[in-house]
Image (cartoon, rainbow, N blue to C red):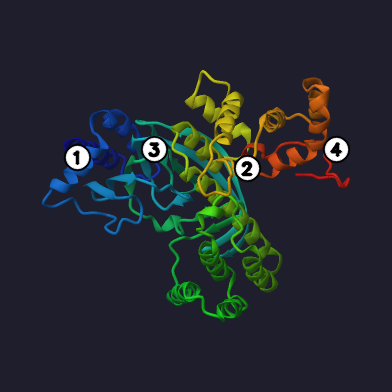
């Protein structure tokens, strides 16, 4: 890998001349990656083939493969190194870094999202409560380069659209000035994912074993543990429970219930101990369930455009963020029309064993539903929608559509699949249900 050696030697010289200033390193690394244009000269497959042929590799920085599938170190210098990370099915959580540098897409493409976190409360050194806000998002294609800044100034996530994907990363080692290296759980929680307490870890292992064995007293034992757990440990326990209680039954893949009563009782135990701030856990897990639901649906879809659509729904909220990325990938298309085309296709796609539901998660989603979705995406009020309906349908069908319109709008508005698209939508307070109650989404 002579090209990687040349890149490493150039960066080492430039950074040494800058007195190893970490503030300057991201720009030095990014500029060198752009000049090297390695994505045009080396394939990801050549990196793997080279790895297999070597009798001795450079000193590997991530031997166990915690980040990447696999990560391969190709060059080491006294104060930085160059890795290639491969991604088959993985994607990155929202996270920050305790190091700096730059990365370049070697293979595939990704949705890159950049966030900020407004902290409202520090629980301890490893756990914080606040609000996660999206700053910007973009599509990264082969050859694109991004600087990596240490700490909170660069909170981001990458969702890899292609299988496989590969990334060249030029990075320093960890700096204690930027620890802990937080991961973020929408919408309100920041945690150090590398924090480990031996006793807590073993208790989680014991809970997992007892759950798998369906021990008759497991709920009582978990409740007793939660009643005396600190805030951070309580979230670790709830996370383990939530993952374990998610159903793997194919017939429930498109109608996730995941024993809500049982899990809710554990949440209530934590609320009683930690009060109001523990209320964020319910929202964190609700968001996680929405993500899991979209991921499961995406796993049954093979069309690249449809998988791209699901990836947008999984990573972004609000059409103001989703539509620009559709336009970036399909510049000749109207994003709204593209969404409607995809929705129509997915409505016709049936998933075997999924309670006769289509790929959207509905038993039926017809032309009326599609028309209502379009109007909602155009920010029309309910009264405007009713007016349009009166003009569009003939008498024999109009009465039925008007009679069903509230239920149809509610169906669309409450659907997990459309929630990211309709986030922030301003509905008129005139939206009402059959019993006359005003409903505000």
Mark 3 or 2: in front is: 2
Q: Which residue is mark 4?
A: 430
Contact (Cβ within 8 Å) of mark 1 with mark 4: no
First of labels 2, 4 by sequence position: 2
Q: As drawn, which residue projects farthest toward the top?
A: 332
Left or right, 57 with reference to 189 = left
| Disc 3 crowd, CA 10 A, few/some/many (<14, 14-19, 20+) | some
Q: Which residue is mark 2?
A: 362
Residue 162: which disc? 3
- How far is disc 2 from disc 4 in space, using C-alphas? 26 Å
Identify the element where label 3 is drawn. Answer: loop
- How far is disc 1 from disc 3 in space, using C-alphas? 28 Å
Mark 2 or 4: in front is: 2
Q: Residue at x 79, y 32 (%)?
A: 401
Mark 2 or 1: in front is: 2
* Residue 336 at least partly seen: yes
* Residue 384 at least partly seen: no
- How far is disc 3 from disc 4 in space, using C-alphas? 44 Å
Left or right, 411 with reference to 76 = right
């Amino acid at each position: 890998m002579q090209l990687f050696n040349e890149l490493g030697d150039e960066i080492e010289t430039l950074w040494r001349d800058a007195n190893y200033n970490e503030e300057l390193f991201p720009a030095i690394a990014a500029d060198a990656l752009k000049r090297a244009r390695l994505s045009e000269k080396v394939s990801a497959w050549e990196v793997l083939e080279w790895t297999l042929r070597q009798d001795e590799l450079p000193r590997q920085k991530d031997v166990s493969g915690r980040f990447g599938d696999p990560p391969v170190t190709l060059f080491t210098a006294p104060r930085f190194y160059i890795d290639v990370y491969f991604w088959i099915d993985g994607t990155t959580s929202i996270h920050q870094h305790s190091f700096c540098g730059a990365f370049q897409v070697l293979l595939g493409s990704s949705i890159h999202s950049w966030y900020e976190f407004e902290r409202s409360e520090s629980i301890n050194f490893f756990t914080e409560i606040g609000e996660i806000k999206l700053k910007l998002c973009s599509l990264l294609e082969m050859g694109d380069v991004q600087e990596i800044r240490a700490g909170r100034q660069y909170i981001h996530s990458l969702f890899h659209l292609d299988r496989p994907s590969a990334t060249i990363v030029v990075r320093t080692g960890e700096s204690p000035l930027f620890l802990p290296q937080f991961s973020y759980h929408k919408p309100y929680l920041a945690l150090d994912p590398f924090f480990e307490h031996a006793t807590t870890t073993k208790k989680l292992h014991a809970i997992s074993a007892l759950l798998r064995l369906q021990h008759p007293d497991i709920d009582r034992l978990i409740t007793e543990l939660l009643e005396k757990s600190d805030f951070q440990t309580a979230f670790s326990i709830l996370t383990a429970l939530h993952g374990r209680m998610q159903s793997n039954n194919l017939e429930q893949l498109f109608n996730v219930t995941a024993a809500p009563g049982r899990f809710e009782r554990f949440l209530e135990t934590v609320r009683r101990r930690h009060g109001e701030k523990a209320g964020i856990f319910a929202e964190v897990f609700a968001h996680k369930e929405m993500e899991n639901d979209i991921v499961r649906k995406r796993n049954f879809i093979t069309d690249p455009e449809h998988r791209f659509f699901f990836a947008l729904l999984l990573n972004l909220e609000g059409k103001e963020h989703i539509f620009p990325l559709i336009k970036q990938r399909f510049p000749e298309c109207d994003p709204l029309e593209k969404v409607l085309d995809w929705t129509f296709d997915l409505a016709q796609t049936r998933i075997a064993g999924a309670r006769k539901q289509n790929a959207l998660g509905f038993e039926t989603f017809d032309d009326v539903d599609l028309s209502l979705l379009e109007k909602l995406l155009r920010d029309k009020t309910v009264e405007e929608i009713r007016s349009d309906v009166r003009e569009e349908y003939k008498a024999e069908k109009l009465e039925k559509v008007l009679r069903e319109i509230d239920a149809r709008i509610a169906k669309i508005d409450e659907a997990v699949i459309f929630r990211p698209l309709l986030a922030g939508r301003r509905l008129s307070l005139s939206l009402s249900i059959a019993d006359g109650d005003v409903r505000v989404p």
